[in-house]
Amino acid sequence: MSGSALYETFARAPLSFERGEGSWLVTADGQRYLDFAGGIAVNSLGHAHPRLVAALTEQAAKLWHVSNLYEIPGQRRLGERLVEATFADKVFFTNSGAEALEAAIKTARRYHYVNGNPERFRTITFEGAFHGRTLATIAAGGQAKYLEGFGPKADGFDQVPFDDIDAAEKAITSETAAILLEPVQGEGGVRAFPAESLRRLRALCDKHGLLLIFDEVQCGVGRTGKLFAYEWSGVAPDIMAIAKGIGGGFPMGACLATDAAAAGMTPGVHGTTFGGNPLAMAVGNAVLDVVLEEGFLDEVSRKSLLMKQGLAGVADEFPDVIEEIRGTGLLLGIKCRVPNAKMNAALRDEHLLTVPAGDNVIRLLPPLVVTDEEIRVALDRIRAGAAALSAAPVAAAG
Ligand SMILES: *Cc1c(COP(=O)(O)O)cnc(C)c1O
C-alpha cells in the first residue's frame, strides 16, 4: 500500500476541516478559511445552516430510508414545488449530478423510442462541457483526459465547439435525439451561452423534433441570481438535470422534464435505490424554503454586483495576474494570466478557498448567504494573493 488506503484519484490540498460555520471552514487547530469553493457549488446556504440542520436532524429521528417501493411524502412535496417553480411537469430524484444526467439522457432516448423513432438516440454536446464521471457522462462531456483508458467511448454523443450553433445544426442527423448543454459551463471556465444562442438552439430543437436538455447541476438553485440560470434567457428546456446546490451538502440530484419529454419513462424502465430518500428530501425542501423566500434571489444579484465591482478593481490593479472577470450571480470566474493552480494556491495561502476551472480560470462560489463583510474580506485576500504573484512593485498593491 502506498500512502493512504484511498484511491489516488484526487489531488487533495493538505488541509482538513473539523467544522463549518456559514461561509467559514475551521481546522482542528482553529485556523479559519473563508470558503468560496463551497464544496464545488454545493454548500448553497453555507455550512451548518440552522434551517438545514433542523430539517435533517428532525427527519433523522423519524425515518431515514424506505426505498421507492413506497410513497415518500417529502419527495412528492419537493417534486410538486420544483414543478411549480419551473418549466417541468415531472421529476425523478437521484443521488448525484451524473445520475441526474444519466436520467436526462435516458429520458430523451426513451421519448423517441416510444414515439416510434428508436434510431434517434444521439445527443449533441459542446466542447468544454462537464456532465459527470460515469461512462455515459464522460462520453457526453467529451474531454479526452476523462475518457482515456476507460475503453471505447460510449456511443451516442457528438460534440461541437462551444457556442457554435451553426456546427450544432450541421451535426443533426436522423439519429439525433437531443442537444445537451450547461447554460453556464462551470468546470469549463464559467462560460455562459449567450441568450441568443439558447434561443437558436431551442428553435433548432423545435424544427427537428429534438429535446433540449439543460445541465443546471452547477448553475441552478439560485447560483446565478435566478432559481435556474435558463430563466435569464427565457428559453425553457424539455429536460433539466440539477444536483449540487439543491442538497446544500446532502448528496442529491433530480431530473426534471415536461410531460411530453417524460412520456417514455413508464413503470419499471428506470430506477434508483437511494434517490429521493426521506433525509435528502427533508434537506432539499429546506433549501427551497430559504432560496424561495421573498427577496433572497435579489440579494444574490446584489452581492454579485458587489463582488464583480471589487474584482474589477483588483483586476485593474494587477493586469499581469488577472485577465478578465466573468460570470453571473455568485458563479464568478477570474481568468488568470498566471497559471490558475498558482493563483488557487496563493489564495489558499491567504485563507481563501476557491476552485480552479478550465480556460485558466479560478471559480468563486461563495454560499448564497455570504455577507457583505465576508465579500470585503474575500476581495482583500484576492488583492493580497494577486499581489504575491504580481511582477509589479509591492507598492502597487496599495
Ligand atoms: C458537478 C457536475 C456534474 C456531476 O455531478 P456529480 O454529483 O459529481 O456526479 C454534472 N454537471 C455539471 C454541470 C456539474 O457541475
Image: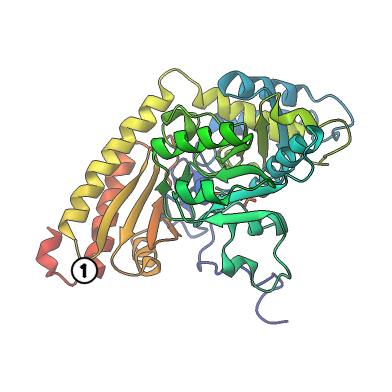
Residue ID at (62%, 31%): 238
User: Hey, which quadrant is residue 242 in on the image?
Assistant: top right
> How many residues crowd around disc 1 within 10 Å: few (fewer than 14), some, or many (20 or more)?
many
Q: Is residue 297 above or below residue 375?
A: above
> For the residue labelled by badge 1, is the local secondary structure a helix, a strand or a loop?
loop
Location of the C terminus (image quadrant): bottom left
Of the pair 207 and 344, the residue shown nearer to us: 207
Of the pair 85 and 205, the residue shown nearer to us: 205
Residue ID at (28%, 66%): 337
Amino acid beneath label 1: Ser
**Residue 216: horizontal and vertical position, in percent?**
55, 40
Residue ID at (31%, 43%): 375
User: Hey, which quadrant is residue 74 in on the image?
Assistant: top right
Q: Is residue 398 above or below residue 379?
A: below
Mark 1 Cβ inside 8 Å of ligand 1: no
Residue ID at (11%, 70%): 393
